[in-house]
Image (cartoon, rainbow, N blue to C red):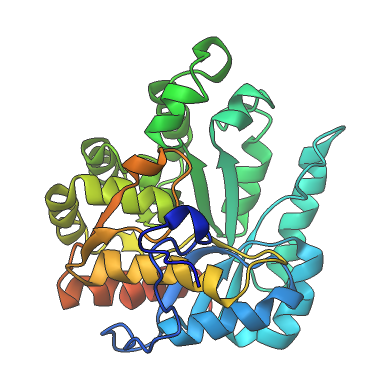
């Protein structure tokens, strides 16, 4: 058996440090249901491994994104453990895709979805020439408003990608451009719960995120995206801990867990293990998940925030239930 602690290159990229992900771990210290507010369970055939890992790590209910055609099968078998976030048919952008997207919002709404997701990371702006504040997307946002649905947006991407992948600012714009675009829309929909995915897309700059939370009282943020959160939250651990405590009424736990055919229990468990160590404990050590944005000898260190119990209670349970109840969803 290879020694993964001394030969990480021989280990799977989801367990470079030889962790036994099946070792028992107590449930989060939370009264009530534990919610993952941002995930991607794509198909029924992935669900057995998904929920096995979720049960092991104490996650009860998922807000998940998948295609409408797959949502029906998932709802039939696992409907008591998920709510669906409405998304478009990915890849079908030719012709009048907005009309098709409107139809899918209606379909998701009819099976109980009350949240619509809009993905406006830099590639959407640079490659597809999309802008959230354009007339093209107004009918979609107005549809969400007319149905009293919440909105989730992915704005921004890791800062390291702005320095490596998105250096062509004539094509992709700048981070400041992207946030101006978002605020142009956000300012007009103060009555809707709005979720800024991945710490509002900028965990590297919590000052920016704080200003957004202070300015928009309907805005929540989720803490999803495992590698991104591990490296950036850990990099400024004390500032992040203060931020989470200050904004404990506005933060939703999420993983951004993504199912695939080849992703079994251990892969899925690796993400849950990292999140629970990051938020609940004072663990300090090398992350078990390989981060492709850094060379082998510069892999990030995970530094847990050891958040207070009342903060964890709100992040895992109270805040998600408050949002779901505001949308008329069962909890």
Residue at 45%, 84% in the rendered image: 22
Question: Is 325 placed left or right of 5 in the picture?
Answer: right
Q: Which of 266 and 129 is in front in this view?
A: 266
Residue 258 place in picture, x, y as percent? 59, 61
Above or below, comparing residue 194 to residue 65 in the picture = above
Q: Nearer the viewer, residue 279 or 212?
A: 279
Question: Is 181 placed left or right of 109 in the picture?
Answer: left
Q: Quadrant of residue 162?
A: top left
Residue 303 place in picture, x, y as percent? 22, 58
Query: Can residue 171 be seen in the rendering of this structure?
Result: yes
Residue 181 place in picture, x, y as percent? 47, 27
Q: In which quarter of the image is residue 163?
A: top left
Residue at 72%, 78% in the rendered image: 74
Q: Quadrant of residue 262?
A: bottom right
Above or below, comparing residue 17 to residue 175 in the picture = below
Q: Find the residue positioned furthest to the top.
A: 170
Query: Can residue 192 be seen in the rendering of this structure?
Result: no
Above or below, comparing residue 256 to residue 41 in the picture = above
Residue at 29%, 38% in the rendered image: 204
Q: Find the residue positioned furthest to the right.
A: 95
Q: How many labels does the image show?
A: 0
Residue 115 place in picture, x, y as percent? 57, 60
Above or below, comparing residue 149 to residue 282 in the picture = above
């Amino acid at each position: 058996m290879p020694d993964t602690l001394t030969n990480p290159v021989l280990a799977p990229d989801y367990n470079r440090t030889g962790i036994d992900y099946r070792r028992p771990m107590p449930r989060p210290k939370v009264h009530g249901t534990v919610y993952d507010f941002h995930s991607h369970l794509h198909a029924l055939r992935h669900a057995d491994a998904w929920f096995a890992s979720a049960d092991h790590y104490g996650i009860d209910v998922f807000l998940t994104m998948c295609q409408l055609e797959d949502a029906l099968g998932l709802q039939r078998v696992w409907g008591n453990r998920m709510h669906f976030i409405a998304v478009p048919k990915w890849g079908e952008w030719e012709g009048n895709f907005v009309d098709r997207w409107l139809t899918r919002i209606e379909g998701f709404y009819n099976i109980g979805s009350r949240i619509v997701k809009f993905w406006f990371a830099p590639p959407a702006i640079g490659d597809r020439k999309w802008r959230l504040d354009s007339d093209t997307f107004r009918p979609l946002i107005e549809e969400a408003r007319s149905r009293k649905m919440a909105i989730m947006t992915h704005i921004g991407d890791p800062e390291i990608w702005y320095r490596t992948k998105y250096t062509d600012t004539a094509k992709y714009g700048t981070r400041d451009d992207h946030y101006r675009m978002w605020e142009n829309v956000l300012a007009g929909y103060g009555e809707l719960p709005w979720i800024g995915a991945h710490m509002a897309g900028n965990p590297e700059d919590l000052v920016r995120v704080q200003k957004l939370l202070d300015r928009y009282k309907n805005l929540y943020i989720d803490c999803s995206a495992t590698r991104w959160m591990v490296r950036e939250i850990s990099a400024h651990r004390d500032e992040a801990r203060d931020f989470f405590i200050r904004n404990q009424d506005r933060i939703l736990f999420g993983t951004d867990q993504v199912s695939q055919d080849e992703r079994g229990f251990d892969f899925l468990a690796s993400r849950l293990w990292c999140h629970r160590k990051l938020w609940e404990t004072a663990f300090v050590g090398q992350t078990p998940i390989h981060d492709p944005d850094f060379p082998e000898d510069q892999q990030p260190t995970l530094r847990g925030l050891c958040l207070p119990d009342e903060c964890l209670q709100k992040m895992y349970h109270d805040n998600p239930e408050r949002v779901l109840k505001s949308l008329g969803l069962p909890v």
